[in-house]
Image (cartoon, rainbow, N blue to C red):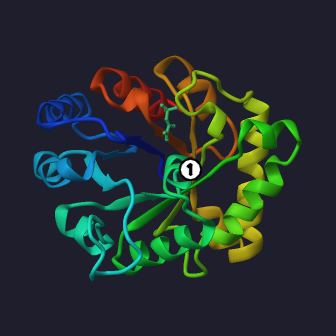
Amino acid sequence: MRRKLAAGNWKMNGTSAALSELDALAAKHPSPSVDVLICPPATLLHRAAERTQGTGVAVGGQDCHAAPSGAHTGDTSAEMLKDAGATAVILGHSERREDHGEQNEDVRAKANAVMEAGLQAIICVGESLEQREAANTLDIIGGQMSGSIPDRSTGENLIVAYEPIWAIGTGKVPTLDEIGEVHDFIRARLERRFGEGVGRSVRLLYGGSVKPSNAAEIFGVSNVDGALVGGASLKAADFSGIIDALESV
Ligand code: PEP
């Protein structure tokens, strides 16, 4: 059985005042029947971890360097994120691939570092609108999976997030059939590469304009084990509705 996961990505949003949203979330879901993860900006991570300690809310990072330490000004290692209280790290988000030119091999190296540190890697894959319109979606996702996912992956250290780039922050969402097609494809590829046991145990998240109003139908799609949520994770009231939907699947 794969545990359901509601993961929030605050991106570059939030200063100290935003930490109260974590209190509200923990109060509303004192012992959730699904996993709940919030990935705040690095500046808030340590305080977020302290604030959520002993609650049903875990915290994670949004990126890391592939090296454990060294002369990399401005970067943060997986070990440091772990030390700050992270249990997971989002990697290969399309905004990192676009803003920082991250390639699949960079994501794989970072994922290896995250797994080495004993954390979970949430590896994002997803096609652009042009790629979807050219009927290249599955080829793109397959290539990103082969290039980004380390050989050492297991159901404990890997989570894959399918995030169509054109659905992120736009209010546009693929049809349920389209989501199902990609999630079934990801599952089949994981089973082929890692064997049925591991392949079936890796959790698959959908991400892209998930809101309380559309979460339940998305969570009903085959091989959707939860969501990676951007905008609707910033306010406890919104994210709470998504957690409710996941708990009632
Ligand atoms: C994201 O950036 O991972 C994301 C899914 O954003 P949003 O929910 O705002 O579309």
> Does 1 sit left or right of 60 as displayed?
right
| Residue sitting at x 47%, y 52% | 3
Residue 2 pos. (x, y %): 53, 55
Does any portion of residue 1 appear in the rendered image? no
| Element on which disc 1 rests | helix
**Image quarter hosting the C terminus:** top right
Classify 10 Å Cα crowding around label 1: few (below 14), some (14-19), many (20 and above).
few
**Image quarter hosting the N terminus:** bottom right
| Residue sitting at x 46%, y 69% | 157
Q: Identify residue for label 1.
A: 98
Residue 221 occupies quadrant: top right
Residue 94 pos. (x, y %): 56, 48
> Does 175 sit left or right of 6 as displayed?
right
Outermost residue, top direction? 213
* Up/down of 230 relative to 100, above or below: above
* Up/down of 57 relative to 141, above or below: above
* Up/down of 198 relative to 3, above or below: below
| Residue sitting at x 65%, y 26% | 173
Residue situated in front as seen by the camera: 157 or 99: 99
Residue 198 pos. (x, y %): 62, 71
Residue situated in front as seen by the camera: 160 or 30: 160
> Does 25 sit left or right of 202 as displayed?
left
